[in-house]
Image (cartoon, rainbow, N blue to C red):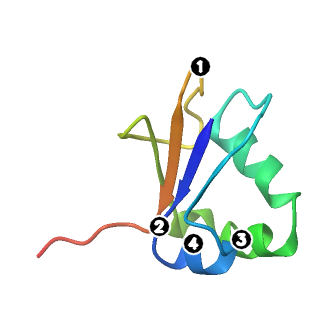
Amino acid sequence: MRVLYFAWLRERIGLPAEDIETSAQTVEHLVQELRSRAPRYEAAFSDLSAVRCAIDQNLVSFDAPLGDAREVAFFPPMTGG
């Protein structure tokens, strides 16, 4: 699965994207796996109220099932303008 990081998440993690193998069933479980990898992931995902996610370019909640997702993206909330 391809995991993408945008804006300050990319800065904290130090990567724009990575390919990972996971047994996570939901986005929330994926985040838990990522947080256990290293302190930089823990810092990036410390406040999930400031993070949004998408599966295969569709906005989803953290309890969304990953299913056969090819891509998961994490980014800060967007503002209009």
Q: Secondary structure at mark 4?
A: helix
Q: Secondary structure at mark 1?
A: loop
**The quadrant where residue 80 appears:** bottom left
The extreme left residue here reads 81
Mark 1 touches mark 4? (CB < 8 Å): no
Q: Which residue is mark 4?
A: 9
Measured from the top left, where is residue 27 in percent x and y? 63, 40
Q: CA distance from mark 1 to mark 4?
A: 24 Å
Inspect the image, locate mark 3, and give the three-letter code of the amino acid beneath it: Ser
User: What's the residue at 71%, 71% (across, down)?
Assistant: 46
Please report whichever mark, 2 or 1, sits nearer to the chain's N-terminal start.
2
Q: Secondary structure at mark 3?
A: loop
Query: Residue 67's mark?
Result: 1
Q: CA distance from mark 3 to mark 1?
A: 25 Å
Please report whichever mark, 1 or 4, sits nearer to the chain's N-terminal start.
4
Inspect the image, locate mark 2, and give the three-letter code of the amino acid beneath it: Phe
Q: Which residue is mark 2?
A: 6
